Amino acid sequence: MRELTFKERQVGLIESLANAWSGLRGSVVVPLLQLAVYLCAAMSVMLFVERVYMAIVIVCVKVLRKKRYTKYKLKLDTVRKEIEDRGTHPRVLVQIPMFNEREVYRLSIGAACGLSWPFDKIVIQILDDSTDHIIRELVESECQRWASKGVNIKYENRSNRNGYKAGAMREGLRKCYVKDCEYVAIFDADFQPEPDFLWRTIPFLLSNHDLALVQARWKFVNANECLLTRLQEMSLDYHFGVEQEVGSSTYSFFGFNGTAGVWRIEALKDAGGWKERTTVEDMDLAVRASLKGWKFVFVGDLLVKNELPSTFKAYRYQQHRWSCGPANLFRKMFKEILQCERVSLLKKFHVLYAFFFVRKIIAHFVTFFFYCIIIPTCVLVPELHLPKYIAIYIPSTISILNAICTPRSFHLLIFWILFENVMSMHRSKATIIGLLEANRVNEWVVTEKLGNAAKTKAQSKWLKRPRFRLGERIHMLEIIMGCYLLFCAIYDVVYGRDHFYVYLFFQAGAAFIVGFGYVGTFMPS
């Protein structure tokens, strides 16, 4: 009799819990999840409208052939002949900040020293913050080698890394030999400008005194190295081909890419110079200069060779910096932008809403929370209403608009979507850190460049069995995401009435591949 009573109590307890969950599910869980669906739908529409707007602008620019820099109607050959005939070359500073760049320092220094400009009107400044004394000696020796050929090259190093890249460039501008320079060209350690780079940028600044920055486009020398670099190329081609071009053509404003650009030193100083308050000192400077009324131009036909990170570790560090920094800058400059009286209300709206809020925050959040959490959850909670145009048509349109900028990789669109969805968790986390100014907000890890090292070492026998630290290969959050997506996919197969499991199985597989570190090239420690 006691045993029967105990069983009855068990059944009663289970029924009570089931009833409590059913009530809680209907009154709290489902309404909250439905609210999350509506919020994600609103963010998707915001991102969709922004992408369609930029697509319309870029089509008009292409059809009318009215890129911003063509409006200046400069005949570069004529301008060059006039400058050479008169001997009125402005004095130009070329800054190359670097940190332990063993594999690429020769390439960048050689390219900078090969720029076509009178030797007495150019100063090549190597800002070496390397902590490895052997690399410091190698870089200094390379500078001395070029100096012996008559190149005006200066080697500068610091005893500390205060301010990182921004601090190094700020101190570089304070040197006595820089006071007569009117313009500064900036290149990261892996960038290799063509000899005519200055002749294709400086004339814009000479003939337009309200112009502060001329930005060139990046050309990726290792785009074919692996799938990771191909997918990066797709994202960055859209950034340069659409986002930068649209910003230049409409508001004469866009984010400085930190390299492959020429600044008017007067404008740089007027904006307050380099600041290290965020990890995106380049974007910070661009926004401050824009608020002072300076204009920018993007020259999309001018390409500068550079290297994409081909190891997943380097790529993750880079993406953390690129996601955390803009969010933190948005937090710091929101009030300043809003109260600025020198720019129009329309430009303020563009900077705050389109440039920062939609592209730097909403884009990451909607990709992660909607496609990796809300849509899988809809499988487990069928009461949720998820419109097809929000779940399928809008994301498809956004993805196609992005991929169309890299026609040769259009067949990789599915891989790009899956990879971007997985990476959105890492970017969203970094964005939240930036918005809240939490731990790691000012973390600065220089993106590792391999140069020719990857090809050289790949041919060596000892690379056949590389050893890795487990912590560098395993990413637990991505693995947990993969487990959740896999569970939702299986649940949808067994109990579902739609075909979300097709997407969920593929997305789970992508999460596991990233989680176990099978992305990019592998280099031993």
Image: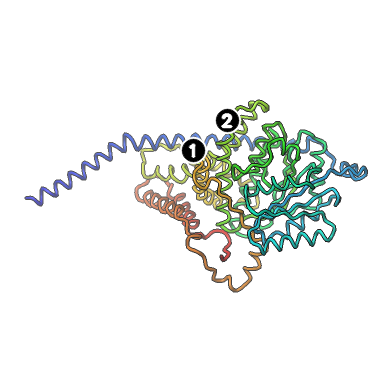
Give the residue pinned by disc 2: 335
What amino acid is found at the position of numbered circle 1 in the picture? Answer: Ile
1 or 443: which is nearer to us? 443
Which percent across, then down, holds residue 84?
A: 90, 45
Asked whether residue 439 appears in the rendered view, the answer is yes
Could you tell me how many numbered marks the image carries?
Answer: 2
N-terminal label among 2 and 1: 2
Give the residue pinned by disc 1: 390
Asked whether disc 2 touches disc 1, contact meaning CB atoms under 8 Å apart, the reply is: no
- Quadrant of the image containing the C terminus: bottom right
What amino acid is found at the position of numbered circle 2 in the picture? Answer: Lys
Look at the picture and state if 442 lies above or below 55.
below
Which percent across, then down, holds residue 322?
A: 58, 46
**Residue 83 relative to residue 444: left or right:** right
Q: Which mark is residue 359?
A: none
According to the image, what is the colour scheme of the structure?
A: rainbow
Which percent across, then down, holds residue 35?
A: 41, 34
